[in-house]
Amino acid sequence: MKGLFRIFELTKNEQRVVLVVILALTVGALVHYERRVHRVHVRAPTAPEMKASPSPVQSEDEQ
C-alpha cells in the first residue's frame, strides 16, 4: 500500500508542472464556458430580428 502512495511524492519541479497543468486546464475550461455562454446570448436576439414584420410605413406604401 505504501508503494501506491509514493505516486504522490513529487519533487518541487514536478509539483510546479502539476500546478501549471491544472491552472491551464482551469483557464481553458473557463474560456470555453465564457465563449459558449456569450455565443448563446449574441445569437438569441438576432434570430427574432431576422424575422422582421413589415413596419407601418411599408404597409401604408403598399396600400
Image (spheres, grey):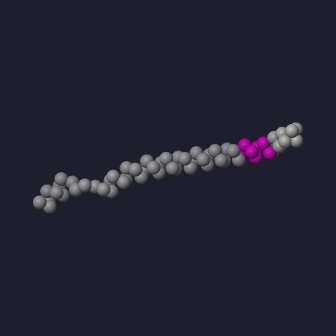
Displayed quadrant of residue 55: bottom left
Q: Does 26 sit left or right of 15 as displayed? A: left
> How many marks are shown on the rendered structure?
0
Residue sticking out furthest to the bottom: 62
Task: Tell me where residue 17 appears, x and y as whole percent.
Answer: 76, 46
Helix, strand or loop: magenta stretch: helix
Q: Does 29 sit left or right of 46 as displayed? A: right
Q: Is residue 2 above or below residue 24?
A: above
Q: Residue at x 17, y 55 (%)?
A: 57
Q: Is residue 1 above or below residue 61?
A: above
Q: Quadrant of the N terminus?
A: top right
Note whether residue 6 is visible. Answer: no
Task: Tell me where residue 52 appears, x and y as whole percent.
Answer: 28, 55
Q: Is residue 37 above or below residue 57?
A: above
Q: Which residues are magenta?
A: 14-20
Q: Quadrant of the C terminus?
A: bottom left
Residue sticking out furthest to the front: 1
Task: Tell me where residue 31 appears, x and y as whole percent.
Answer: 57, 48
Q: Looking at the image, which is closer to me, 37 or 27?
A: 37
Q: Does 41 sit left or right of 27 as displayed? A: left
Note whether residue 17 is visible. Answer: yes
Task: Tell me where residue 20 appears, x and y as whole percent.
Answer: 71, 45
Q: Is residue 56 above or below residue 1?
A: below
Q: Residue at x 37, y 53 (%)?
A: 46
Q: Residue at x 43, y 47 (%)?
A: 41
Q: Does 9 sit left or right of 44 as displayed? A: right
- Whether residue 29 is in magenta: the answer is no
Displayed quadrant of residue 11: top right
